Image (cartoon, helix red, strand yellow):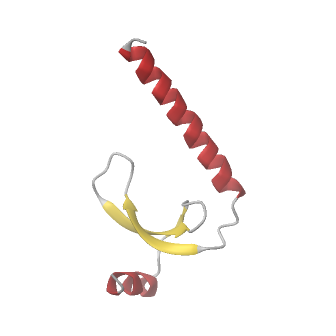
Amino acid sequence: MAKSQKVFSLIEKKRKISKEIENLQEKCNHSKKSIKSIKEHEASSTFVVRCVCGYCEKIIGIPTTQELNKYLNGR
């Protein structure tokens, strides 16, 4: 398989996996919230603190000042 075909194949697999994750996250009721440090976006080296579903890992909000302080002091 030529390199360009391999790259195309991998990109297509990545797209399908991302779509499957998105579908699972849409069906999740996000009943378990946790605070995590995550990349700002996929290609970024900058991290941000967000509220994330403990089951599906979807970003569900921004922590309150109290939640942020508790997260930072608990490290």
Q: Residue at x 54, y 34 (%)?
A: 15
Q: Residue at x 65, y 67 (%)?
A: 30
Q: Residue at x 44, y 88 (%)?
A: 66
Q: Quadrant of the C terminus?
A: bottom left
Q: Looking at this rendering, what residue extends furthest in the front direction? A: 1
Q: Looking at this rendering, what residue extends furthest in the left direction? A: 45
User: What x and y, as percent, mark residue 36?
Assistant: 43, 70
Q: Is residue 34 left or right of residue 27?
A: left
Q: How many marks?
A: 0
User: What x and y, as percent, mark residue 35?
Assistant: 46, 74
Q: Residue at x 36, y 16 (%)?
A: 3
User: What x and y, as percent, mark residue 53?
Assistant: 57, 67
Task: Kindly indicate the quadrant of the structure image that contains residue 73.
Answer: bottom left
Q: Quadrant of the N terminus?
A: top left
Report the front residue among 1 and 8: 1
User: What x and y, as percent, mark residue 63?
Assistant: 47, 76
Q: Looking at this rendering, what residue extends furthest in the top direction? A: 2
Q: Is residue 16 left or right of residue 43?
A: right
The answer to whether residue 2 is above or below residue 55 is above
The answer to whether residue 7 is above or below residue 62 is above
